[in-house]
Amino acid sequence: MLQVLERFRTILGDGYVLTQPADLVPYEADWRGRYLGEALCVVRPASTAEVAAVVKACAEHQLAMVPQGGNTGLVGGGVPRMGRREVVVSLSRMNRVLDVDGANSTITVEAGCTLAAVQAAAHDVDRLFPLSLASEGTCQIGGNLACNAGGVQVLRYGNMRELTLGIEAVLPDGRVWNGLRGLRKDNTGYDLKQLFIGSEGTLGIITAAVLKLLPMPRSRAVAWVALASPAAAIALLGLMRARAAERLSAFEVIGEAAFDLVVQHMPGVFSPLAERAPWYALIELGDSDPAGGVKILLEDILGLALEERLISDAAVAASLAQMADLWALREWISEAQKIEGISVKHDISLPVSRIPEFLDAAGSALAEHFGPLRIVAFGHAGDGNLHYNLSRFNAAENTAFIARSAEANQIVHDLVTSLGGSISAEHGLGQLKRDEIRRYKSGIELEMMRGIKQLLDPAGIMNPGKVL
Ligand code: FAD
Ligand code: ZN
């Protein structure tokens, strides 16, 4: 072990091989504090060549590696396991923008760039990099790719998969695959980059990527609306799509319990509407034409929705500051929940049309099985993606409920599957759903996944115990 640590120090320099327990702490626990592990060390390479040399050393010593970006993942995929002497490979020093090609509308970045830094670099050349998540100040492009991150603008711009043209990755034996092509058309066989996107660090370490840039929206409009039911929300989504078409860039729903937590825990937050409602939607339209009239369009559609009784009230932001205030109500939900305490979390996707049916059936089935629960439901309804989190109102009772997570998961996941949905929409499997997925994915799909893992990582040293 001393020998391999010495080799890491030779490759990286003394300061970039962390072994002191106090230095390891931030890398050993996940954002929610649900997964705690132990690292043999944390290595902090500054280039692809250094990553490759570190991986080669690990492969020779049969040491398991855990790639880590901003460590904001929600399924325990980026932290080491207990008692396993795993090497955490942190990409945070690889944070350079390598190239911006305006004519090709692409940006090439190292994997350790934060998402916010990539958005800012795009902004500097008057372009948009549209991936947008509440964790964007901390999460990194490598982590976004490894999780195929989604977020709040997927219905207009797609997930990380749709936003990526090329990647570079270090394979589990230390070889470097340079697939940094900025091409929108390339039919030369299997699309290997898509294997790495969403692989949660189990097939290799992503070191760089070529990402798409889009035209910057020149005008925006944001509204917060009150709704009587999920069915009304889905009907409103249909109306928005029909009238605003591609200008609809976000359609988020927020259940009353989620809204209550934000108002209760986050300072300076207030309700934009006089009346309370069981459901809310946050809607954004954007247009690349500065005189696009999106605010008038949004007000017109909402007027129609009021007439048709799809909504009971609405507030349309009158300034950029008000837009930010409305978005804060949505973005603070995760933080507010964290303050409130642990819950049984689900990140599910469904055909959009079946969201109301799911919410109805899941609410009844859970109440029948567990009695009263707090259901914090919110998410990217425009993509059919809900975050559906369960807890008891009382902290002492909650501990006992958390111990019964498996029962709650089965109720929710069986229902999701019966409605044609997925048990992981955007957060991945990590450690949290590694066993659960075996119940829901077909044997043939799991077999193909295992075959790919075996081909690229026969020794099983790249992020073991995650996904598969
Ligand atoms: P990490 O947590 O460091 O790692 C996540 C996984 O990726 C791990 O399996 C890790 O091994 C792997 N990995 C990291 N870097 C690399 C690399 N360079 N090469 C190979 N594998 C790597 N997610 C969404 O999709 N949509 C949301 O709206 C959203 N909102 C969030 C809000 C909050 C407040 C928080 C805390 C999280 C949210 N997330 C969301 C989850 C998380 O932020 C994203 O999944 C993000 O993409 C993770 O990036 P990261 O750099 O923090 O990755
Ligand atoms: Zn989300």
Image: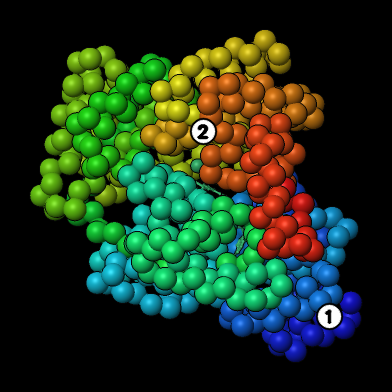
Q: Is residue 331 above or below residue 97?
A: above
- Determine the image quadrant of residue 362: top right
At a point 75% along the width and 28% down the height, the residue shown is 406
Q: Is 359 or 283 nearer to us in this picture?
A: 359
* Residue 388 horizontal/vertical position (percent): 57, 30
At a point 39% along the width and 17% down the height, the residue shown is 231
The residue that label 2 is drawn on is 349
* Residue 160 horizontal/vertical position (percent): 46, 54
The residue that label 1 is drawn on is 4
Res 389 label: none
At a point 56% along the width and 56% down the height, the residue shown is 195
Residue most extreme to the front: 189
Q: Earlier in the sequence, mark 2 or mark 1?
A: 1
Q: Is residue 351 above or below residue 102?
A: above
* Residue 64 horizontal/vertical position (percent): 79, 65
Residue contact between numbered discs 2 and 1, judged by CB atoms under 8 Å? no
